[in-house]
Image (spheres, grey):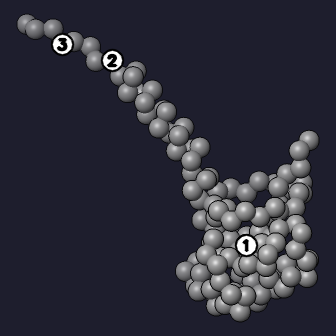
Amino acid sequence: MKQMGNIDILPMACVGLILVLVMMMIAPLVMTHTQTSVDVPMAHTAETKTEENLTVTFTIDNRLLVNDVEILPEQLPDVIAAELDKDPFQLVIVRADKEVYHSDVLEILAQVKKTGAKRIACATKKPRE
């Protein structure tokens, strides 16, 4: 009778663990819309979990972007409404540069609220401690 050799599965398990770790590190980068550089204000807030959301970005040079696609300000309600038709409970994140006028940011927030968004958040970054 022939004896069977042992198969070492430790290297395969290590490769699988490394793949899981790489995916965990890359997933937050892929799931957020942060290609447009905006210097958001600092605040003491809780971190949000990573999910598919709708990002409205307002830059220092008054450009308006939805999910990193530039639009005209008068197109904002239609674009937001079209996205909310797909999922009415998705989170709408407003990213605005800290140097823009607050009245402009409040106007964007009002338009987003008027389109029927149920979940709205403003993007900030944690101050260094």
The answer to whether residue 24 is left or right of residue 76 is left
Residue 93 appears at what percent x and percent y? 73, 70
| Residue 4: mark | 3
Identify the element where label 2 is drawn: loop
Q: For residue 84, which numbered disc appears in the image?
A: none
The answer to whether residue 96 of the structure is visible from this angle is yes
Q: Report, in whole angstroms, how far the alpha carbon at label 1 lies from the one at label 2.
A: 51 Å
Q: Nearer the viewer, residue 29 or 81?
A: 29
The N terminus is located in which quarter? Answer: top left
Q: Are marks 2 and 3 in contact (CB under 8 Å)?
A: no
**Residue 59 in the figure: left or right of residue 29:** right
Q: Where is 93 relative to 9, above or below? A: below
The residue that appears at 91% across and 77% down in the rendered structure is 101
Q: Tally the numbered discs.
A: 3
* Residue 113: percent from left, percent from top: 77, 84
**Residue at left 57%, top 56%?**
30
Return the residue at label 2: 8
The residue that mark 1 highlights is 57
Give left or right: position of 99 versus 113: right
Label 3 with label 1: CB-CB less than 8 Å:
no
Observer able to see residue 121:
no
